């Protein structure tokens, strides 16, 4: 697969991809490109600092690495960002346009794997039950999360670039990634456990959810890149019923969990177990009413400059069913989860606690 360029290579997913590439010897010439290169280093990899939103930076790293394979994992966090609409637009859409424009100027990039999101086919209102890749993409304002809107636009760009100038592309859609280096799900759930919020449950707790251990997502990226290379050099039929180029794939742990069971499992691993008989169930309608009041209060006191962390969207997200059928990934990529949910939870929490201790000691 050499040379391989991992955009966002110091992020939670990116460094897992690099580690697996080198550990499995699928590649030996691997370069990480990121806006910050001071975290998640993997021995044996090379590091280049730069922004995907800078045409100069992207063109420079392509000329330096001359990659055969590119893994595009770059994306701002879904939560906790400032000026989110502008940031998502500049990075997810603008950065992808810049990347594809620069790739079109060279002839050595053969495979591009894009890290998308399962949320691109979801309006965050209705339930998803065993959803497949046949579901249509949602765009703003029908798409209620602007982040997901920009990921859908980026998917369109990636799809349009497929088979241009010898490039083959594919799109992978993980569902709520968690694991070592995850900066969203794991830290938030451990924080909730420490403050006692895990003692409360919104709704009856029967809503099923699909999640993806981050290392399994990395494994899927490598499988996808290998498949694209086989199609690129004629070892596989790029027009056949099992083709990977031009396709999208859902990637999960293939293990539906009740959402609140996952929350409590994370809390228990972090040392804050909550027995089910000690859980206080808050009816969805009651919590929804509280969220409405919180939204209006924060809006009023901030003169419209802030948004409440407790909001109606969050109520829906905590009580909806969101499951996916990954038969297509199994059939065409040969994907199977390598790490179970329980083992993934253990790794995620232990990694976070260990690194939290390291930061405190420094």
Image (tube, rainbow, N blue to C red):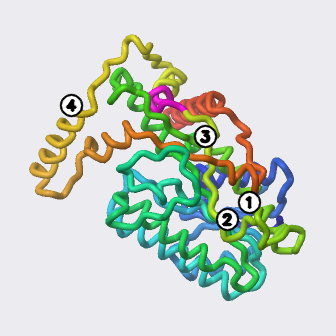
Going from the N terminus, do you reach mark 3 or mark 4 first? 3
Kindly identify which residue carries mark 1: 224
Which numbered disc, 2 or 4, marks the residue closer to the eye?
Answer: 4
Going from the N terminus, do you reach mark 2 or mark 4 first? 2
Percent x, y of residue 83: 32, 64
Which numbered disc, 3 or 2, marks the residue closer to the eye?
Answer: 2
Instruction: Using residue 140 as the reference point, say whether residue 360 is left or right of it.
Output: right
Q: Are marks 1 and 3 in contact (CB under 8 Å)?
A: no
Task: Give the numbered dot on residue 113.
Answer: 2
Please, what secondary structure does the residue beneath circle 4 have?
Answer: helix
Task: Give the numbered dot on residue 286.
Answer: 4
Give 355 or 321, whichever is nearer the viewer. Answer: 321
Instruction: Write the start and end of the magenta stretch as one range.
Output: 257-263
Q: Are marks 2 and 1 in contact (CB under 8 Å)?
A: yes
Kindly identify which residue carries mark 3: 180
- Asked if 20 appears above or below 71 in the picture, the reply is above
| Residue occupying the far bottom of the picture | 105
> For the residues marked 1 and 3, what is the alpha-carbon distance in whole angstroms?
22 Å
């Amino acid at each position: 697969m050499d040379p391989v360029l991992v955009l966002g290579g110091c992020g939670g997913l990116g460094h897992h991809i690099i580690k697996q590439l080198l550990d499995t010897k699928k590649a030996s010439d691997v370069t990480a490109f990121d806006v910050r290169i001071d975290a998640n280093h993997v021995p044996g990899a090379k590091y280049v600092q730069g922004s995907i939103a800078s045409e100069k930076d992207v063109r420079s790293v392509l000329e330096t690495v001359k990659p055969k394979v590119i893994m595009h994992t770059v994306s701002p966090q879904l939560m906790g960002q400032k000026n989110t609409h502008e940031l998502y637009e500049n990075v997810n859409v603008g950065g992808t346009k810049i990347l594809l424009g620069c790739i079109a100027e060279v002839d050595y990039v053969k495979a591009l794997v894009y890290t998308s999101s399962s949320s691109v086919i979801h309006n965050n209102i209705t339930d998803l039950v065993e959803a497949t890749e046949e579901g249509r993409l949602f765009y703003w304002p029908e798409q209620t999360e602007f982040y997901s809107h920009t990921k859908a636009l980026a998917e369109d760009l990636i799809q349009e670039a497929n088979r241009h100038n010898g490039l083959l592309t594919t799109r992978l859609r993980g569902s709520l990634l968690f694991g070592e280096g995850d900066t969203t799900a794991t830290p938030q759930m451990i924080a909730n456990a420490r403050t006692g919020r895990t003692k409360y449950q919104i709704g009856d707790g029967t809503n099923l959810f699909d999640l993806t251990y981050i290392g399994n997502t990395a494994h899927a990226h490598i499988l996808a890149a290998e498949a694209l290379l086989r199609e690129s050099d004629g070892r596989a039929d790029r027009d056949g019923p099992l083709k990977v180029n031009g396709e999208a794939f859902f990637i999960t742990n293939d293990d539906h969990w009740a959402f609140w069971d996952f929350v409590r499992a994370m809390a228990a691993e972090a040392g804050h177990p909550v027995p089910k008989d000690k859980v206080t169930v808050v009816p969805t309608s009651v919590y929804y009413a509280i969220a409405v009041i919180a939204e209006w209060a924060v809006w009023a006191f901030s003169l419209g400059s802030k948004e409440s962390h407790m909001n109606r969207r969050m109520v829906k997200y905590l009580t909806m069913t969101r499951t996916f059928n990954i038969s297509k990934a199994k059939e065409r990529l040969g994907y199977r989860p390598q790490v179970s949910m329980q083992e993934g939870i253990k790794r995620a929490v232990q990694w976070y606690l260990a690194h939290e201790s390291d930061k405190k000691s420094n």
